[in-house]
Image: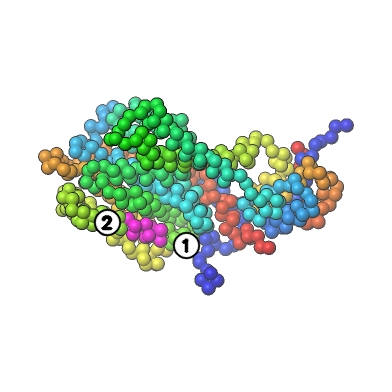
Amino acid sequence: MDEQPTPAPVIEPGYTFGTVTDKISSIVLTRPTSNGWFLGFGVAFLVTMGLLYAIGYLFLKGVGIWGVNIPVGWGFAIVNFVWWIGIGHAGTLISAILLLLRQSWRNSINRFAEAMTLFAVACAGMFPVLHLGRPWLAYWLFPYPNTMNVWPPLVLSVHTVVSFDFAIGQVPGWHTTIFPPYFVAGAIYSGFAMVLMLAIPIRKFYGLEDFITERHLNNSAKVMLATGLIVAYGYGIEAFMGWYGGNRYDAFLLWNRLHGPYSFFYYMLLLCNIGIPQVLWIKRLRTSPFWLFLISGVVLVGMWLERFIIVVVSLQRDFLTSSWGMYYPTRWDWMTFIGTIGFFLACMFLFLRVLPMISIFEMRTLLPEAEVKE
Amino acid sequence: MKHTPVYGLMAEFDNPEAVVHAARKTYEAGYKKIDAYSPFPIEALSEAIGFHYNFVPLVVLIGGILGGLSGFALQYWIHVINYPVVVGGRPLNSWPAFIVVTFEMTILFAGISAVFGMLALNGLPMPYHPVFNVPRFALASKDRFFLIVFSSDPRYNALETRRFLESFSPRSISEVPS
């Protein structure tokens, strides 16, 4: 152990228990609200209003305003649901698993990763209700009495159960046992991408580079690279089994992904999720906020495309040629999707304004003086 | 005669090493009813005041076992006792099919017991606690470390205990009114 080079610090030197406390709490308690905050929150709030408008019209008219129809009965609602749930996964990973592995660098990003998780899950939670068609029966979905304190273990299992929806179906493409593990890997992949997309501007605007250091960016990028490779393995196995399994419908699904009407999105998916993130092997890019921000955005797009491919392309052409069809999202689909992004950002802005975004006591434990030598 | 009841004597320290040292010496001197407060968790500190283990893992284990059993019992009751239906020639107690719910209920109950067990063992929620009567105690959530000897300790003596705590040269010593 001793021969290893000391890693970069997770908190810059020169801080005491008091200054850590003041630096984090002053953002909420003493600093005036900046114009940038009002602008950002205002835009996010307007988009949220758009979401409410789309939902209002949906409840008035029904799911016919969306592009869903037979054979593609699951469209954007499920794509977005799975995407958001996946993003929410990073908070679980950072707060639970990295804690168990004693990765103390997580301390400065876990609070807002957890907040992000809650908001992402709130976005995800809307879609099951919205896609019901009979939203007044929405409470049938919930295992009431509900207990809010149990979300960390639940989120861990929720995503696996969601992936079972796709793993145990009869439809080719929804009939593979690889889904549970690669869904979880993909979830962490997109979750860390979202954490980076939030952390990079936040540390810049609030001057928190001392707490969210280069090492955090580097480590998060490494997690992204590793989970991205697991995802790539999942795609590879899926394609391999389509070819090797000898089932003509599975083989056709593969052909349809590569040459069908949505093939452009499949190639974009490969590019966004497997191709471009490989540049993270380069350390200079892993520690560059600018490039990391861009790559995280690419990964988020890629993960959304993955959900789209799994949901839409599988349904679009299954066993009977006579029942093939196409799916085109309508403006209401887009408005709902973009609306949830606005809702998510509006919640994040409020969180930054009213709560300390970094867990103060956990930062204190990182200071050298916190160590008790005997 | 009426006098203000005293909850204990509280000493304030600057750094974690000082409070751990003081706590250990106090415990070794025979004071058993003591407690310490710090702005972040210090493992050595709980050792020093003689708090070696807690019962949360046990509570979680019991909760998990109960959850698993109740998840299984629920399905067993439905499928074998209350509404027996033979499906595909399988036995009524087709336990492999019950595993998913059993597993989820284990996690659910273990999670609930962890949260509520922790709260209960901490005695939370607690609307009133005497230590907050000391104004300087607010610093315990910033950068100061506190050690308290409760007046209920059999060795407690207002004068001697104060003198004993002063030997650690703390920043301040306050009497905590209860």
Residue A316 shows in the view: yes
Q: Residue at x 69, y 59 (%)?
A: B17
Task: Name which quarter of the figure residue A134 lies in.
Answer: top left
A97 lies left or right of A291: right
Quadrant for the C terminus of chain B in the image: top right
Q: Which residue is mark 2?
A: A237
Q: Nearer the viewer, mark 2 or mark 1?
A: 2
Label 2–label 1 contact, CB within 8 A: no
Q: Which one is earlier in the sequence, the residue at label 2 or at label 1?
A: 1
Q: Which residue is mark 1?
A: A215
Chain part drawn in magenta: A221-232
Q: Residue furthest left?
A: A322
What residue type is disc 1 on?
Arg
The front one of A5 and A60 is A5
Q: Is residue A224 magenta?
A: yes
Q: Residue at x 63, y 41 (%)?
A: B122
The front one of B91 and A14 is B91
